[in-house]
Amino acid sequence: MATGLVNTSPVVRGAGEVLTDPAALDRFLADHGLRSGAVRASDDLARVHALRDEIRAVLEAAEDDAARRATELVARAGVGPGLHRDTAGRWQWHVVTAPHVSLADELAVLTGTGLLGVLHALSYDRFRHCAAPGCNGMFVDTSRAGRRRFCMPDLCGNRLNVSNHRSRRRKAT
């Protein structure tokens, strides 16, 4: 979710703001398995935009600073993580937040917890910039092999593959 949120910024590909209004934010949350209809206050969108910049700063920070900043995100409104069974009976992390916190603070706790988990389980070198030319996206590589190169493989990766394919075809003719 942190990767997805960071890559909604207009600075990523220069394509403009993705989270243009509360409805777009609501769709983003639903697409990431979070509560639909969670946008509760008129300033939720502005706060989430500010949080997006903070998360990008975590991803771009040096390792120790990234851990400190992610911990600050968790401390913002977190009560504590726990394990709960989902509807299929599988264990899933559940992060509890303080009552009546803003949507941005809830997202800060969720993303901070996830980023700390990656730092602990996979390592800092999994925080990466997109390898596609012209893309300023960032991502957290949670793949098993740790070889992911693009913030959005289906977009950035495909564009680069198509470009390389066309280049090879031109050289062959």
Image: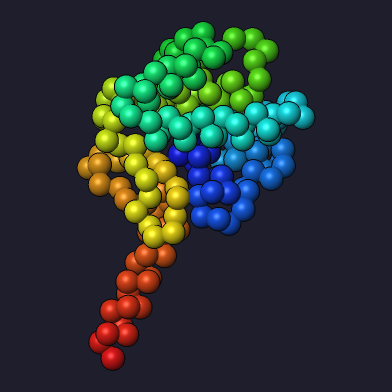
**Residue 99 image-quadrant placement:** top right
On screen, residue 133 versus residue 102, left or right, reads left
On screen, residue 33 versus residue 102, left or right, reads left
Q: Nearer the viewer, residue 87 or 102?
A: 102
Residue 86 seen in the figure: no
Please give the name of the residue rendered at 47% of the width and 27% of the height, measured from the top-left corner.
111
Question: Which residue is most to the bottom?
Answer: 173
Please give the name of the residue rendered at 51% of the width and 55% of the height, measured from the top-left corner.
13
Residue 13 seen in the figure: yes
On screen, residue 19 versus residue 148, left or right, reads right
The image position of residue 129, as x and y in percent, is 37, 45
Question: Which residue is most to the right?
Answer: 42
The image position of residue 8, as x and y in percent, is 56, 45
Q: Nearer the viewer, residue 135 or 163?
A: 135
Where is the C terminus found, in terms of image quarters?
bottom left
On screen, residue 11 versus residue 117, left or right, reads right
The image position of residue 21, as x and y in percent, is 72, 42
- In this rendering, the count of numbered labels is 0
* 138 vs 122: above or below: below
**Residue 156 image-quadrant placement:** bottom left
Q: Nearer the viewer, residue 132 or 86?
A: 132
Question: Which residue is most to the left?
Answer: 145
* 108 vs 52: above or below: above
* 155 vs 76: above or below: below
**Residue 59 image-quadrant placement:** top left
